[in-house]
Amino acid sequence: MRDYNPTEAWASRLPTSCKAALLRLARLSLLLIIAAVLLSSCASRYFSPLPAPRETLRIKDLGDLPHNELWQGFVFNGEKVGFAHLKIVPMPEVSQYQILSEAYLRLRFMGMDKHISMKSDDKVRSDLTLVSFHYEQKMDEKPLILDGKTTDNKLMMLQKSGGAEKSAEIDLTGPLYPTSVINLYPVLKGMEVGAHYRYRVYDPQTQSMAEVTQSVIAFEESKKLSLEPAFKIETHMHGHSASSWINMKGETIFELGMGGIIITYKEDEKSAKSFLAEASMNKKDLIFDFSLVKTDTPITCPRKAVFLEMSAEGLSGHLPPLQGPNQEASEQIINGKPVTVFRLHGVLPPKQEAREEPLPKGDNLLYLAATHHIESGHPEIKRTTHEILQGTLTSSEKVDRLVKWVSSEIKDEVVDSFSAVEVLHTRKGECQAHAMLYTAMARAAGIPTKMVGGIVYMEGMGFLYHSWAESYIGRWIAVDPTFNQVGVDAAHIKLVEGHDWTSLLPLGKVVGQVKIKIRNYSCSQ
């Protein structure tokens, strides 16, 4: 008999439209957890300090490393969820190396098995600078393929996803590195307590350039974990931090994150690969259970909520309190604990064009600009937007028309979407896909628009991580093309905002840490 799963059983009783909405909202939670698995932070509770070595650890060439392979396991909330493998191969070209890396994650989520694989083939010079890369990512068999190379102070890339190809060219102002060398960089540049490094990498997961900062902060050992003496390295990228322990051989032997929720550790090949068989036996719904934010008081009418007052623990120090357009937020100390207090009002659709001051020039340019993921200048985006908006006169009418079109034309499916153009081609996606396409179209229509991330209350469950948008029509107004809302309900809690979907990444710092207390709410009839 098949094991009973209460989450899956609950979901099976939902109408089809409600299940689709829940799955596409929860999808963002899964992506944020994956980001946290790959880069996270916490204090070194398992290690004790040692006197630092007298000499700096520096390996001058990758070929001098005493190892050329490293296997690591991923543990999330007490359960093994995947493994990673890195291999360094000398190339025929003088002083060049091939760095092959792969990672596999397998989790149970909303009663479904989720498979994620990432593979990269990076070619680097002896100083670790990037020559070329090939990257493949699959989530539930949907592929993203990236190829790139550096030449004449430029990075040239080709992206394949959703049956379409997209090329890009970026000017380089200095050395560029692949993400696969992040834990190798301090080994070759020199590890001694107090050393600091700063450099830029190309991150294939976000298809963007990112600044990396690293500090060697201690030399430690862990008798509790039977781990040898190692340097502790703090790495910062995309607003996240990672704590890594690298031994005197240059091997990353341990990483720890999210208060012990995430552990990465060195293991042998046989143990790493055994995960594939063991994972099929795992029945725990790790991601859903961890990312769902339950409340002490249920909200019985979230899509009709016109007022909500609540307090949240776990945000202070990680995400600043954001204001407007329908949200007031402040940090307070209650019972000796830092909390963020929210007061939200459901916003009705505007009756007429607002008469207010225009945006500052910098904000206007930022929120009208095309990005790698939000291609507002693409001919297909511009043509489709023009067709949708025929006959409209005001910005309010245009926002309303675009929200309704995206909500009705984009099929509700829990699939990856890597850009607005891809969503337009496939006509399917989850909340992030809806928000990206709407944002691209609004910008193409000359309406400054932000991407927004946060949590939304789902009746009978609690808060789930979600993405929507805000557009400027003389004043900012929140819109949700997933729920077909122009002026969102009061159960939308904004936590992050920005010009691109990468602005959502800081949410990964608080997933699983937030506790909410409902103070008061009211709903329309």
Image (spheres, rainbow, N blue to C red):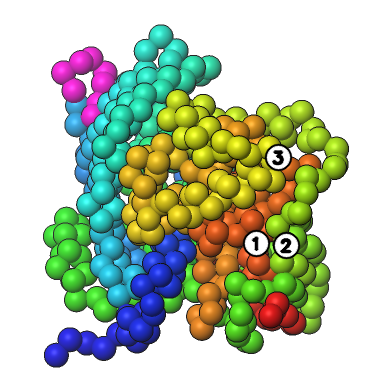
- Coordinates of residue 377 in the picture (x, y in percent): 51, 27
- What residue do we see at 45% from left, 40% from top? 420
Tag 3 residue: 394
- Coordinates of residue 167 in the picture (x, y in percent): 36, 24
Magenta residue check for 95: yes
Say what amino acid the circle numbered 1 marks.
Val
Q: Quadrant of the C terminus?
A: bottom right
Q: In the shown orientation, is residue 465 left or right of residue 113?
A: right
In this rendering, which labeled residue sits more in front, label 1 or label 3? Answer: 3
Dot 1, how many residues are within 10 Å of its Cα: few (below 14), some (14-19), or many (20+)? Answer: many
Q: In the shown orientation, is residue 68 left or right of residue 312?
A: left
Find residue 347 and name its label: 2
How many discs mark residues in the rendered view? 3
The reply to whether residue 190 is visible in this rendering is no
Looking at the image, residue 493 lies above or below residue 95: below
- What residue do we see at 44% from left, 12% from top? 153
Say what amino acid the circle numbered 2 marks.
Val
- Element under label 3? loop
Looking at the image, residue 525 lies above or below residue 123: below
- Element under label 2? loop
Magenta part of the protein: which range? 91-99
Tag 1 residue: 488
**Residue 279: quarter of image:** bottom left
